[in-house]
Structures are given as C-alpha cells and as structure tokens.
Image (cartoon, rainbow, N blue to C red):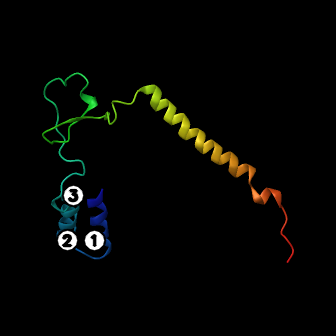
Amino acid sequence: MAGRLTAMGSRIMGGHGAAARAAASALRNRAGMGLPAGRHIVPDKPLPVNDELVWDNGTPFPEPCVDRLAPHIGKYEALAWLCGGLSFFAALGLAAVVNDKASKMPYRPSL
C-alpha cells in the first residue's frame, strides 16, 4: 500500500520510476528494522498443552502470562481490599454529591 502511494506521489510530482521504486523499497523494508512484531515462526509440530499461557519472547527464561506477584495473599483478603477500595471511591462520590455547591446556589450571586 505504501509503495503504491509513493509511486503515485512520485508520478504526480513528476518523478521517474527509479525514484518510486527506491522509495517503495525503503518503505517496504522499514529502514532495515523489519516487521514490528519480529519474525513469524510457523510451528512445524503440535504445540504443547497450555502454550497460550506462557509468554515466550525469545529470552532464555519464558514466563507465565498471569503473574503471581503475591501468592501469600488469599482470594478473600484480595476481595476485602477490592471492596474496601471501591467503597472508598463510593464514599468520595457520595460526599461530592452531598457537598455540591452549585446545586445549593443555582443562581448567580449579585455583585
């Protein structure tokens, strides 16, 4: 697509085919950086079980996609923290509604 647009722009600006080919080649190769996500490796054998749960970006140590940052915190303690945080923001919103100055004085004060 970029090559076609560059060729069309070159024709509009009065350039020749060589300039269009050079610009299309440069855009297609992305200045030597390659594809944005690296090379695509096509598997030639069946994938292991639960392969989608492992993040393997080519480093020597693949890691699980779902990190266990705090395995010592149980699910009920995490639920308590979540409910506490949500209730804090609910109380903050309720305080903002109760202390809404604009609704208590809907008219502009005279100077």
Mark-to-mark CA distance, 1 and 3: 16 Å
Mark-to-mark CA distance, 2 and 3: 14 Å
**Where 31 falls versus 72 (above or below)?**
below
x 17%, y 23%: residue:
46
Crowdedness near tag 3: few (<14), some (14–19) or many (≥20) residues, C-alpha within 10 Å: some
Q: Residue type at mark 2?
A: Ala
**Where 16 falls versus 87 (above or below)?**
below
Kindly check if marks 1 and 3 are in contact, taking CB atoms under 8 A apart as contact: no
* Picture disc at residue 44: none
Q: Residue type at mark 3?
A: Arg
Question: Split into 4 quadrants, where in the image is the N terminus?
Answer: bottom left
Which of the marked residues, 2 or 3, is nearer the chain's N terminus?
2
Q: Which residue is mark 1?
A: 10
Q: Which residue is mark 2?
A: 19
Q: Which residue is mark 3?
A: 28
**Picture quadrant where residue 42 is located:** top left
Which of the marked residues, 1 or 2, is nearer the chain's N terminus?
1
Crowdedness near tag 1: few (<14), some (14–19) or many (≥20) residues, C-alpha within 10 Å: some
x 14%, y 25%: residue:
45
x 65%, y 47%: residue:
93
Question: Split into 4 quadrants, where in the image is the C terminus?
Answer: bottom right
81 to the left or right of 90: left
